[in-house]
Each structure stands twice: as C-alpha cells, then as structure tokens.
Image (cartoon, rainbow, N blue to C red):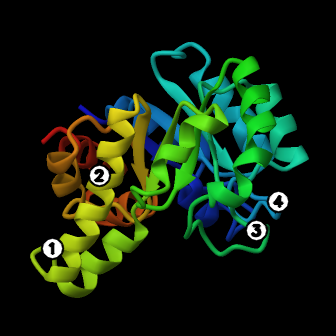
Amino acid sequence: MARLSVNLNKVALLRNSRHTGSPNVVEFGRIALEAGAKGLTVHPRPDERHIRRTDVHDLAALLAPLRPAIEFNIEGRPTADFLDLVAEIRPEQVTLVPDAPQAFTSDSGWNLSAEGETLKPVVQRLKQQGARVILFMDPDAAQTPAVPATGADGFEIYTGAYAEAVRLHGLDSEAGQAALQAVVGAAQVGQRLGLMVNIGHDLDLLNTPPLIAGAPFIHEASIGHELTGDALRYGFAEAVRRYGAALAV
C-alpha cells in the first residue's frame, strides 16, 4: 500500500495571503496525521512564497514524537541554504528537485546525463546525515537506469503530464493511456533496479487509482494541491481520508 504524504505548501500559501497566521500550517499538519497521513511534505522555496523556514522547524517539532514511523519529507533544489536547513532538521527523506529559483512549480525532472555527477556529492552528504534521498524525475524509463549511479535511494516520478493528459483527454483516450504507461513503465524499471519509487504532482482522486493499479509497489505519493482543493468540498480531514483510500486500491 502506497503511503500518503500530505504536502502543506498550499495551506501555507493561503496563510501567507494575510498577516493573521491563519490557516495555521502546524494545525493542518496535525489534522492530516490524525486523518491517517503517513507523513508530511514541504517544499520551501528561496522566496518563501508558501512554506517558510520557520514552518519547517515547527512541523519538525510536531512530528518529533512520531518519527521515524511517520516521516518528514523535505523537497527542494540543493542550494546551500536548502542543504543547511536539511542538516538542521534531519528529515527521514529528502527529495531533490531541479527547480530554478523563479520556477512557478516543479514541472520537470533531473537530466542525469548532464547533472548526475553534480548530484553525487550532494546525495552522499545527505545520506551521511541519515536521510533517504529521492530524485525528482520525468516519467522516462530510458533515464531511470541512471539513478543508482548517483547514490540516490530512489526517485519520485513527475506525474503532472499524466494528470494533464487525463484532464484534457480522459483516462481511456490514447493520450491518457500513453501518459499512464509512461509513468508505470518508469516505475517498473525502478522496481527492477531495487529503487524506491514515489509519485507526485497534480494527483487527484480520479487519476491516482489507475497509477496504483498499474504499479502497486509504489512506496509513497506526495499530494498537496488537489487534496487542498478537495478539502474545500469535503473538509481537510475527509479529503486526507479519501486520498488515503485512493492509494489503497
């Protein structure tokens, strides 16, 4: 059964639109855990447009009595500031993404033929600190075999293109099925290589179950944007429960 790690970035983004401190990120982290989430994810960016450095410390305090069974996953580009923050927190998992500082959102994975050597010392440093290291990758089965050479423990498949194909054309369309098979194919290569396989980006209650059915060995899904949107319909706790059920098919 794939674990649900609730990404709290969009809760923080809403909080940052006012100066009242509401909604409280830690409170919603607690609600997610009480509703069955197996971990929390944050992606602090240099401009702190959603998650702030202080949020990372506050959430680490929330999770302290629950770790390592309930995991903290910190995502980001491995800048000096990001690596310093990770060294302070010592999360169970660090997901490295290739986002430029001005990136609107994560929309592509690492090009390991060009950046794999640069990642090796970063991966080694993080593993020495006790973190599992995950690389954010495109759903490209041809590039998956390059992951082990970096020393990373696994990879998170970018599912944004899959989600868009399903949204625009439907799951049963040629485009929808091609996008699904791209994700499943990359996941299967990762499994054969003994890598941990995670998924994330624009996953929702409709497009998640087919992925899990196609690759039931997926370890974790990091979900935030769509879950937060569904929370407007169902309430935050109920949305978390529904996404946990979607991962249990």
Front residue of 242 and 117 = 117
- Is 236 drawn above or below residue 171 in the view shown? above
Q: Which mark is residue 46?
A: 4
Whether residues under marks 1 and 2 lie with C-beta atoms below 8 angstroms apart, the answer is no
- Residue ID for mark 3: 100
Q: How far, Cα to Cα, is label 1 from label 4?
A: 36 Å
Taking the spot 39% from the left edge, 40% from the top edge, the residue there is 190
- Residue ID for mark 2: 239
Q: Which of marks 2 and 3 is in front?
A: 3
- The amino acid sitting under disc 1 is Leu
Query: Residue furthest toward the left?
Result: 172
Residue 96: x percent and y percent? 65, 47
Whether residues under marks 2 and 3 lie with C-beta atoms below 8 angstroms apart, the answer is no
Q: How far, Cα to Cα, is label 4 from label 2?
A: 29 Å
Query: Left or right: where does residue 66 sit relative to residue 26?
Result: left
Q: At numbered mark 3, what does the secondary structure look like: helix, strand or loop?
A: loop
Taking the spot 56% from the left edge, 67% from the top edge, the residue there is 108
Q: How far, Cα to Cα, is label 1 from label 2?
A: 22 Å
Whether residues under marks 1 and 4 lie with C-beta atoms below 8 angstroms apart, the answer is no
Taking the spot 23% from the left edge, 72% from the top edge, the residue there is 178
- Residue ID for mark 1: 171
Residue 197: x percent and y percent? 40, 39
- Is 247 drawn above or below residue 153 in the view shown? below
Q: Which of marks 1 and 2 is in front?
A: 1
Residue 25: x percent and y percent? 60, 46
| Pointer 4 or 2: first along the chain | 4
Q: Nearer the viewer, mark 4 or mark 2?
A: 4
